[in-house]
Image (cartoon, rainbow, N blue to C red):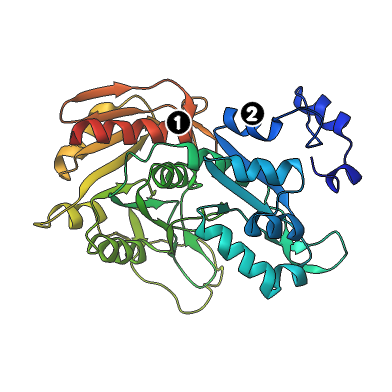
Amino acid sequence: MTEAARQFVTPLSLQVASQDRVYTSLFEEPMAHISLPAKADVMVVAPATANTIAKLALGIADDLLSTCFLSFQGKMIIAPSMNWKMYENRTVRKNLDTLASFGVLQVGPEAGALACGEEGTGRMAEPADILEAIRSVLTPKDLAGEKIVITAGPTREYLDPVRFISNRSSGKMGYALARAARDRGAEVTLISGPSCLKKPDGLAFVGVETASEMRKAVVEAVAGRATVLIMAAAVADFSPKTKSAKKIVKTGEMALALSTTPDIVSSVSSQAERPFIIGFAAETGRHPGRAAAKMKNKKMDMIVFNDVTEPGAGFDVDTNRVEIIDGKGRTKLGIMSKYEVADAILDRFIEIRA
């Protein structure tokens, strides 16, 4: 903790919360500025004030934090926090650019209400986002060189300007795959239907609504020499044959004529130069055979089957229980977080491509 930090939170409070020692002075333990960095895998400065950022950029070493920074040789992350006017100051931006040129990763800041009562960009990134950055820098980059296109979320097929057919997909599995692939060094394009999830940082994002829009976005992304396509989106199978230009007036019962939507996987798998294709098969019941048949019929290289009626494996939850099916066999996984499922899928891809 710096001297300024101790004006907001006492060292004792952080010591109790962390169940670990809190260091505050350059002189309380000889050589702490050397021994502490030597034990660390990553260094995180959060919050990073304009003053601290200037010290780190210029190499000023007048307290424990700044001396630790100079002696640390691993991955570094800063989470800036200050008034929006200070953040936009050209000196601060220059110092941030200097740190970026050193390889320091910046997380945030975010826009919103500030401690001073003003609105603007200067709030420290949420702890969850900082943790995600830590996980990313510590993850081995075994997918470096891969260009992975991932789809996520539902699609909407409109009846009129205010009504549509959709499904319960939240996009959580596809977003987890995008974050996992990004963390492992891949160049990622995430194509997402409507979702309430926050867009992941560090990747290309394309927002779509309908199945035809998703197909167009996928074809264009794959044409950019993608090496892998992961179809985690729950693309609607049917779309209204006609769309009313005006809101349909309720007059009683209504018969709805539907037509099938274009098959995105088949349009990609039939190409002469095609990426490695991973699909998903969500079923209501234990029907992995259907998934295997789907993989064969659509010429996919791998498919991920899950029974959405199982506890912890349905829609809009943070866990999943899947079975990975490919040409060499089947791998059944227990219940785990969707990020862990994503890692398992990518692990299997690496094994097959080896």
Residue 331 location in percent, x, y? 29, 22
Pick whichever, 33 or 116, lies toward us: 33
- Specify whether residue 241 is in view: yes
Vertical placement of 72 versus 194: above or below?
above
Pick whichever, 215 or 249, lies toward us: 215
Pick whichever, 318 or 14, lies toward us: 14
Q: CA distance from mark 1 to mark 2?
A: 34 Å
Q: Which mark is residue 35?
A: 2
Residue 13 location in percent, x, y? 87, 31
Task: Please state if 338 lies on the left or on the right of 269 as rendered.
Answer: right
Q: Quadrant of the C terminus?
A: top left
Q: Residue at x 49, y 42 (%)?
A: 137
Total labels: the figure holds 2
Residue 277 location in percent, x, y? 23, 45
Vertical placement of 197 versus 112: above or below?
above
Q: Amino acid at mark 1?
A: Glu
